[in-house]
Each structure stands twice: as structure tokens, then as C-alpha cells.
Amino acid sequence: MIDQALVAPRYLAGPGDPAWVTVPLHQASGWSHGHEPLLPRVVLSSPDQKTLLRLDPVPDDQWWRITHNGGSPATSWYASFGARTPVELIAAVTDALTDPAPDQRMLADPLRPLRRQGWETAPDGEFRSPDGVVEGERLTFSGSNSWFITAGRKEDVPLWEARLDGRTPTHIVVAFTQALADPAPLRRTHEQTLGLNRHRLDLHWQQVPAESLASALPTRVARLAARRPGAPPPAARPSPPARRHPR
């Protein structure tokens, strides 16, 4: 059995494992990647070469960047996320982006998922989490209303920031706000809880079978691959053995 932490609120759970985003894009959605073994950088491009994801550990800047070239300014957009943004929030964006049949219910007001969970919202697009840790707003810049979301704005250094261009498809923005407001805790390993501010969150430990922990990512890849009509199942890849950690 392996110790696993359940962390809430999820926006304070720390970044998690980047593979939760990058591996499904490559294995389930067919995104290609370059190979730069001497650089701590990941670059993935969509099969149609219109969308690019970069994971680049640049100090004091957004680590995650998604850019989409739709062929014109009106159909091109970007999204970026800070280093400590939980990968599950970024995965909600990439999952919506690669969904071949987006749920029409996701075309609603991006603030609706927040209101349903008791977040404060305003008609101009501003919102705030019940604990005041997360704040968001829509700012007009160069004729486009872009989303700026910050966790821990009142701190000397914000925990993380997310920026979504005003031209980002609505269902993708809704996927992010829905994942942001979801009250379900996020799962973290022992190492992933190191450095978290435990005075601001609820952290509960549970024991899970090592096999369950190791199969979480392959299960996610298989589920996303099944969305593609006629796509063959992804090749099974061995998962690294889970290690035991003391509490």
C-alpha cells in the first residue's frame, strides 16, 4: 500500500506531475514532440500543426503556454499557466481542446460553474473563490477581453497565474472554470505535498494499492484515446514502480 494525500481546495494542491498533461496529448491525441535531451523543455504540436504546447521552466514567467494559429487574428488564441498551477486544471483545457465532439453544455457562461459552487461573480467577469484565495477578471486589451486568474494575489508572490485570451473557444474556458471550482480534492504523492502551505488547505492521507497509483495515468490515456472514432487503442507502456514513503 502507498500513502496518498487528498488536498483541498484543489487550487492550492501544487503543480502535480506534468505527465498528466503531456503524455495523453502524445499517446491519446497524436501530438508530436521534438527531442532536446539537454534542455528542460517540452514542445508538443497538434496533428494539424495549428496548436503548440510549450512547457518551459523560465524563472518568473508562465511555464505552460498553449498557442493556436487559426489562420486569422479572429480565430487565433493563447493560454498560459504558472509553474504552480495544478496540472489537473491545465489538463481540463487540453482535454477540451482535443475533444473531437465537445459537449454543447460547455458553451454556456464561463462563470456558471463558479456560481454553482458559491463563488462570487460579477456581470463584468470578475470572480472570487469563497476563501478569497483565487481572483479572476476580464481585462480589455487591444480590443480583446482576456481572462486573468490569480491564486494568492494578496501574497508577496502569487502562487500561480492563468491567462486565457479573449478569443479562446468558450467550451475551453468553461472547462477551466469548471475544473477550478470543482470541490473534489486532488491526489498527491508524498513528494508533491512538500512545500505546500498546510495552514491554508485540508490534507488527508489515505492508503491505496501501488497498482492503483501506477495505473492512473494509463487509464486516463485509454479513456481519452477512446474519444477518437476509429482510433486504435494506445500501446501499453509499463509504468514506473511506485515507491513507499513515510508520512
Image (cartoon, grey):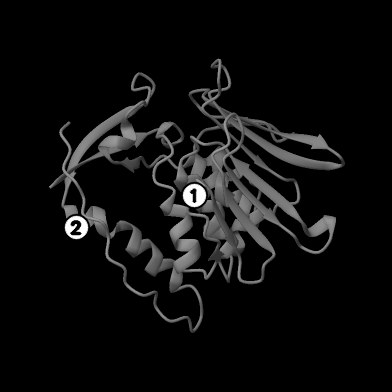
Furthest residue toward front: 38
**Considering the numbered disc 1 on the image, is that residue within a helix, a strand or a loop?**
loop
Foreground of the two, 176 or 59:
59
Residue 244 picture location, percent across and down: 16, 43
User: Does residue 37 appear to the left or right of 214 in the view shown?
Assistant: right
**Considering the numbered disc 2 on the image, is that residue within a helix, a strand or a loop?**
helix
Identify the image quadrant of the C terminus.
top left
Residue at image point 81% right, 64% down = 71
Using the rendered image of the protein, determine whether residue 93 is visible from the camera's viewpoint: yes
Cα separation between marks 1 and 2: 32 Å
Task: Give the answer, above or below, for where 178 lies relative to 34.
Answer: above
Residue 7 picture location, percent across and down: 34, 35
The residue beneath circle 2 is 211
User: Does residue 13 appear to the left or right of 96 in the view shown?
Assistant: left
Quarter-of-image position of residue 23: bottom left
Residue 161 picture location, percent across and down: 59, 33
User: Does residue 64 appear to the left or right of 50 in the view shown?
Assistant: left
Residue 14 picture location, percent across and down: 42, 34
Furthest residue toward right: 143
Residue at image point 43% right, 81% down = 232
Q: Amino acid at mark 1?
A: Leu
Camera-nearest label, 1 or 2:
1
The residue beneath circle 1 is 38
User: Does residue 169 appear to the left or right of 62 in the view shown?
Assistant: right
Task: Give the answer, above or below, for where 16 lies relative to 35.
Answer: above
Task: Give the answer, above or below, for where 209 lies relative to 120.
Answer: below
Of the numbered discs in the image, which one, if any, rests on residue 73?
none
Q: Amino acid at mark 2?
A: Glu
